[in-house]
Image (cartoon, coloured by chain):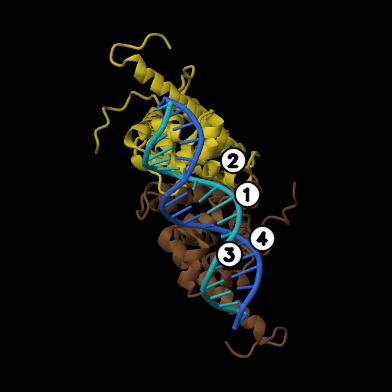
Chain colours: A yellow, B brown, C blue, D cyan
Amino acid sequence: MSKSDSTSDWREARRQSGREAIVDAAWDLVHAEGLAALSLRDLARRAGITTPTVYAYFDSKDAIYDAMFGRAATEFVDWVTAPLEAREPEELLMLRAHRFVEFCTSDVARYQLLFQRTISNFKPSAESYAPAVRALESARECLVLNGITQPKYLDLWTALLSGLVDQQVSNDPGGDRWTRLIEEAVAMFLSHVRSMPGTRTPRSKTSTTRARR
Amino acid sequence: MSKSDSTSDWREARRQSGREAIVDAAWDLVHAEGLAALSLRDLARRAGITTPTVYAYFDSKDAIYDAMFGRAATEFVDWVTAPLEAREPEELLMLRAHRFVEFCTSDVARYQLLFQRTISNFKPSAESYAPAVRALESARECLVLNGITQPKYLDLWTALLSGLVDQQVSNDPGGDRWTRLIEEAVAMFLSHVRSMPGTRTPRSKTSTTRARR
DNA sequence: GTCTATAGCTGGATAGAC
DNA sequence: GTCTATCCAGCTATAGAC
């Protein structure tokens, strides 16, 4: 917004804002027409420019998808890691589950781009993907807070939540037939994991340093 | 194979076999190139005919997708309801979970067409969809055998399994990072549901007729 | 950076002869 | 039913003037 910092001049800043404007238009279009219906013609028209101008900012259509992915991934990590007033770890986990499902179901196109492989041959770049990795790491930490440290339970956790989301958006879009099961699903998960050996009881500092074996 | 039965003449049988040959070719192509890459040109070439001939058998491309969906749905219900030697209900449920996941992960394109909404505006016809409904009903009955009658637990069940499948094909295609969690996931599900009130213990005929309330 | 114009391709679907 | 030939629409991407 203000004067750019010393590392980049105003040219680069302007170019960035141009890119952002195009990504804005791309998301508008995708929300209206669906993820696969994005075309450079329509995109340019919505952005108030022409198709060749798009190529002044992006090398290809996939580069646009990549920028869209990067924004979505940033929104994702910001959304699920936004601060929560400190509570018990269990409530924290529950709130994060709600946030995840809310994030996914509130924008199905974004969910598809971010979590499903619905676009032909598109693969996000490492830079665009990085925020998503941070979000997963944050989920892992939240499980650790609950005394859950085994990697397989992180996998089970993601499967459980993405299963609810997937069924919801596939079979009851706009409804709550599956999202209303979140609380019970999380309770099921927690009580199962806690019933297994090798799980520290949450916030208990009584045990020793928990060596690997 | 033999003489057709009295209700339809040989013309119709021949037309049917023509359709089947085209659907064969369509699945071949989709397995090789992906679901979205199906084009009528390539399809015709693989089937050994020309594009206009395809229209002698199908009204549109969507009609082809519909026939593909119908075959996939039939394979699905045949696969998951294939007879199992009689065992305890719990083992039956476990075997069916394995079958479901095996079915989905063994052919991702088929899984996408059948369970995800990856094709633009395609909606299966009621006829093509019917077998999938039968399969769901069969899953419901299998849960009932385990004393699980509440509809929400059928939803939780499908979410759990489809979540494992979804994560598996999205994040570890060809691997077993999520599929190896099936047994534990099913155990988690069963012990949770059984811990809740309103669940009959399996195969117990001791309780009365179980009125709705 | 932005435009006009257009290349080059692929797609679904159809006309009409045989 | 099957073909040849073709239409028409849509797409990504580029050339070249300004």
Element type where label 3 sits in the image? helix
Element type where label 2 sits in the image? helix
For the residues beneath circles 2 and 4, the answer to whether they share a chain is: no
For the residues beneath circles 3 and 4, the answer to whether they share a chain is: yes
Element type where label 4 sits in the image? loop
When the figure is inspected, residue A21 is found, relative to residue D7, above or below; the finding is: above
How far from the left and from the top, in percent, is residue B89?
54, 61
Q: Are marks 2 and 1 in contact (CB under 8 Å)?
A: no
Q: Specify the farthest residue to the top.
A: A3
For mark 2, what is the residue?
A33
Question: How busy is the neighbourhood of tag 3: few (under 14 within 10 Å), some, or many (20 plus)?
Answer: many
For image coordinates 37% across by 25% down, the residue present is: A204
When the figure is inspected, residue B115 is found, relative to residue A14, above or below; the finding is: below
What is the quadrant of the N terminus of chain A in the image? top left
How far from the left and from the top, in percent, is residue B124?
63, 58
- Callout count: 4
Tag in front: 3 or 1: 3
Marks 4 and 1, the one that precedes in the sequence = 4
How far from the left and from the top, in percent, is residue A179?
59, 38
Numbered tag placed on residue B64 in the rendering: 3
Q: Three-letter amino acid code at disc 1?
A: Thr
